[in-house]
Amino acid sequence: MTANQRPLDGITVVSLEHAIAAPFCTRQLADLGARVIKIERPGSGDFARGYDERVRGLASHFVWTNRSKESLTLDLKQEEAGAILDTLLADADVLVQNLAPGAAARMGLSFEALQARFPRLIVCDISGYGEGGPYEKKKAYDLLIQSEGGFLSVTGGPGDEQMAKAGCSIADISAGMYAYSGILSALLLRGKTGKGSRIDVSMLESLVEWMGYPMYYAFDGAPQPPRAGAAHSTIYPYGPFPTGDGGTVMLGLQNEREWAAFCDKVLLTPTLATDERFSANFKRSANREVLRQIIVDSFAQLDTEAVIQRLEHAQIASARVNDMQGVWDHPQLKARDSWRDVDSPAGPLPSLLPPARNTAFTPRMDGVPGLGQHSQGILQALGYSGEAIDNLRARGVI
């Protein structure tokens, strides 16, 4: 292996992508060295570019999911754009798409149509509900899948109007992760068979896989885990508690030994450990309102740092409840040198290193592309002259 050879060096991915799921998948492939050519609409591009302007005028979702890619604008409704795409696919290893259901097939980009011409090509189709079934054609946005997949029913506060969505696009993220791992497995399979394959990823199935615990908890019609806000629904105390200086501390107990240590060294009330109301986890959970008030009253006399020190002394798991600035400034991320600057149309921006650190290579951390930033270079590499490229641009093909 040459110095810093990455796992996907030499792999080319062509992606007809927008929003979150497919871009998150392909960005992770790019992290591993793949060349990702992102096909975008001329003029507007990936509509995630317009979600907000929070990152010095750029969209937060787009900055997160699109570093290290090449942006090529193509109006795929025009025949010449289709010819350019065909030329790219002839040398590509992977095609990823999360267009509207059926759109890729209508463009002649189904796996069956492509396999005949490009037998080594891997095709990954990402959709809301997957191929077949009564929901195949339904529109599927992240919050809708959180709803259909049962996530909302177990998230938020206990009241009927207190259901809460995740603060990030969890259904999109889950689909992007399974597309990513599915493509890696398809590349390994191709190494054995010499043939490409199709990967069908649905947001619904991706999120439902992550719902395994609450689903089995409610097995055979049993009641599902109750919504408990930021606290654990079945283990107590396990959640956020206010401190005397207006802060909040998250703490969690997992067993009776920790409960006894918590009473002795944190609450300074060792006899509470054997109180019949709280002498087992199911009793503490059933009497959580009474126990919560005892804890709140004790913590009210202390500031956040003092509470954390007591928890650390008792070897009780705890955490600060950080806001986003607290995460940007997190001392552990700084100590582990977790941030890198990447280029963007707005100048250098901090970007988190991929979480799965490998000592054998350095992940690719290239810039976030401007719309059509690489069109000229890609087309020149395909043999188009400057004049021909200008002509394509004038006619709205690129």
Image: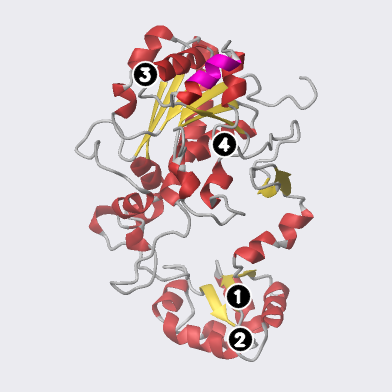
Q: Which colour scheme is used?
A: secondary structure
Q: Can residue 398 be seen in this view?
A: no
Which tag, 2 or 3, sits closer to the chain's start?
Answer: 3
> Which of 105/188 is in front?
105
User: Mark 1 near mark 2, Cβ–Cβ under 8 Å?
Assistant: yes
Label 3 to label 4, Cα distance in Å? 22 Å
Q: Which amino acid does label 3 sit on?
A: Phe
Q: What residue type is labelled 2?
A: Phe
Which tag, 4 or 1, sits closer to the chain's start?
Answer: 4
Instruction: Answer with left or right where residue 351 lies relative to residue 94.
Output: right
Region of the chain picked out in magenta, as a range: 386-391
Q: What residue type is labelled 4?
A: Arg
User: Label 3 neighbourhood size at 10 Å, few (<14), some (14-19), many (20+)?
Assistant: many
**Residue for badge 1:** 249
- SS label for mark 2: helix
- SS label for mark 1: strand
Residue 130 screen position, x and y as percent: 31, 34
Residue 133 screen position, x and y as percent: 21, 35
The mark lying in front, picked from 2 and 3, is 3
Which tag, 3 or 1, sits closer to the chain's start?
Answer: 3
The mark lying in front, picked from 4 and 1, is 4
Label 2 to label 3, Cα distance in Å? 60 Å
Check residue 105 for magenta coloring. no
Instruction: Establish if 185 lies above or below 191.
Output: below
Instruction: Establish if 304 lies above or below 74.
Output: below
**Residue for badge 3:** 111
Residue 223: quarter of image: bottom left
Q: Residue 134 got which mark?
A: none
User: Mark 3 near mark 4, Cβ–Cβ under 8 Å?
Assistant: no
